[in-house]
């Protein structure tokens, strides 16, 4: 009886710890190479599952169909991200959700408590000039690492966002 009780308590505890999930993919059809060196326009679509809460995924590291390199491979050639927007999908996330971007070393590039605070709107496109998490006048530079995107304070099940951003050369 004691073993059954322990298993039941463990199962209930794990069931209550459901983590929201998000999947981000590059929209290859939206990729445009600009006329200036290093100028690119990328867009990724992030879709949340049915569990509300904090969700994290990596920036896409797989090249879309018909493309040779992934957007992270291109950015990591020393490019700078100078503008990023957040466009709510048909079902938008919770108004004033927060955005964080960090690299695989844990360095915060956009802070959910700083320049990423409340940048996600339920119905309106939000443009955000990029910063390094401390100084909003600095661009994000491809540093050879994988970046992750985290959205917090979203309580809308099965919502999505489109994240377009632009780069410039070194």
Image (cartoon, grey):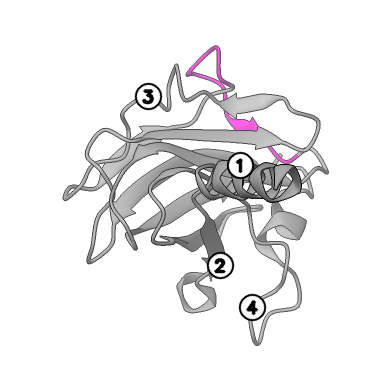
Magenta segment boundaries in residue numbering: 133-142
Q: Of helix, strand and loop, which one carries label 3?
A: loop
Q: Earlier in the sequence, mark 3 or mark 4?
A: 4
Q: Earlier in the sequence, mark 1 or mark 3?
A: 1
Q: Nearer the viewer, mark 1 or mark 4?
A: 1
Is residue 46 found inside the magenta-colored segment of the image? no
What's the mark number on residue 27? none
Q: Nearer the viewer, mark 2 or mark 4?
A: 2
Disc 2 designates what residue? 25
Disc 1 designates what residue? 9
Q: Position of residue 36 (x, y in %)?
A: 58, 54
Q: Earlier in the sequence, mark 2 or mark 1?
A: 1
Q: Position of residue 168 (x, y in %)?
A: 59, 45
Q: Nearer the viewer, mark 2 or mark 1?
A: 1
Does 93 sit left or right of 5 as displayed? Answer: left
Q: Of helix, strand and loop, which one carries label 2?
A: strand
Determine which quarter of the picture holds residue 23. bottom right
Q: Of helix, strand and loop, which one carries label 1?
A: helix
Whether tag 1 and tag 4 are in contact, CB under 8 A, the answer is: no
Q: Earlier in the sequence, mark 3 or mark 2?
A: 2
Does 33 sit left or right of 86 as displayed? Answer: right
């Amino acid at each position: 009886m004691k073993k059954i009780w322990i298993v039941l308590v463990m199962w209930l505890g794990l069931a209550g710890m459901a983590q929201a999930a998000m999947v981000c993919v590059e929209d290859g059809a939206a990729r445009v190479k600009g006329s200036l060196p290093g100028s690119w326009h990328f867009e990724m679509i992030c879709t949340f599952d049915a569990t509300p809460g904090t969700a994290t995924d990596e920036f896409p590291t797989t090249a879309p169909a018909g493309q040779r390199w992934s957007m992270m491979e291109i950015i990591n050639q020393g490019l700078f991200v100078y503008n990023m927007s957040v466009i709510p999908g048909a079902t938008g996330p919770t108004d004033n959700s927060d955005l964080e971007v960090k690299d695989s070393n844990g360095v915060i590039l956009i802070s959910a408590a700083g320049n990423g605070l409340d940048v996600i709107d339920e119905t309106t496109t939000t443009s955000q000039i990029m910063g390094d998490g401390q100084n909003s006048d600095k661009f994000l530079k491809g540093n050879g690492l994988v970046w992750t995107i985290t959205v917090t304070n979203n309580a809308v099940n099965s919502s999505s966002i489109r994240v377009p951003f632009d780069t410039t050369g070194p």
